[in-house]
């Protein structure tokens, strides 16, 4: 079984709040929280896939700030390679086209949410690199 490749957007707003999305109840890990993004298509880079998916799911245009090392997640039913990518919103307005709910949360609140199991590595990544991410977000303010 070939691993599915999934791009995950780590998006901070100007106040340093992070966007998280609640998974559709009909999907695997339904009702749990995740970083928005989605599957890469055959000829897409992780960054291209993220830009397309965020446009489809949230109606926003993003600029990629940094790509982090991918990691694999597998259980009895799935095998997925995740590509965490920090980006910032450069256009559009968030419209929830797919999730149960979309929220901006502070880093202090991140532990209060029940993330889908594959997302915990990215939660840790965000916690560990948060100060840097804020600086990176701010340094490219248009």
Image (spheres, rainbow, N blue to C red):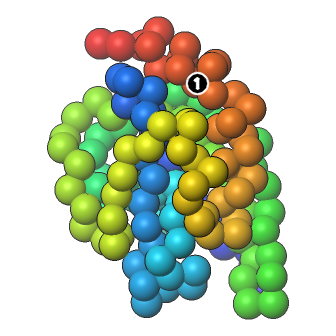
Give the mark count.
Answer: 1
Q: In this view, does 8 lie above or below 3?
A: above
Q: Residue at x 43, y 34 (%)?
A: 17
Please give left or right for residue 71 compared with residue 39 in the image.
right
- Where is mark 1, residue-wise? 133
Which secondary structure, mark 1? helix
Q: Which residue is drawn at 53% across and 20% down?
A: 134
Q: Name the residue nearer the viewer: 102 or 58.
A: 102
Q: How far across and down, in percent of the image, does residue 24 sit?
A: 41, 79
Q: Name the residue nearer the viewer: 25 or 2.
A: 25
Q: Residue at x 45, y 73 (%)?
A: 23
Location of residue 133 by image quarter: top right
- The answer to whether one can see residue 40 in this image is no
Q: How far across and down, in percent of the image, does residue 30 sit?
A: 50, 81
Q: How far across and down, in percent of the image, does residue 117 sit?
A: 70, 69
Q: How far across and down, in percent of the image, does residue 89 sit?
A: 33, 34
């Amino acid at each position: 079984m070939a691993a599915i490749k999934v791009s995950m957007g780590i998006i901070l707003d100007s106040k340093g709040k992070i966007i998280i999305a609640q998974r559709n109840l009909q999907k695997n890990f339904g009702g749990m929280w995740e970083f928005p993004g989605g599957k890469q298509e055959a000829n897409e880079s992780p960054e291209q896939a993220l830009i397309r998916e965020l446009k489809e799911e949230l109606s926003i245009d993003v600029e990629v700030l940094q790509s982090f090392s991918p990691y694999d997640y597998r259980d009895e039913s799935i095998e997925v390679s995740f590509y965490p990518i920090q980006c910032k919103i450069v256009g559009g307005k968030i419209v929830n086209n797919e999730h149960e709910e979309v929220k901006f949360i502070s880093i202090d609140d991140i532990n209060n949410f029940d993330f889908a199991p594959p997302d915990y590595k990215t939660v840790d990544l965000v916690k560990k690199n948060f100060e840097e991410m804020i600086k990176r977000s701010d340094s490219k303010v248009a």
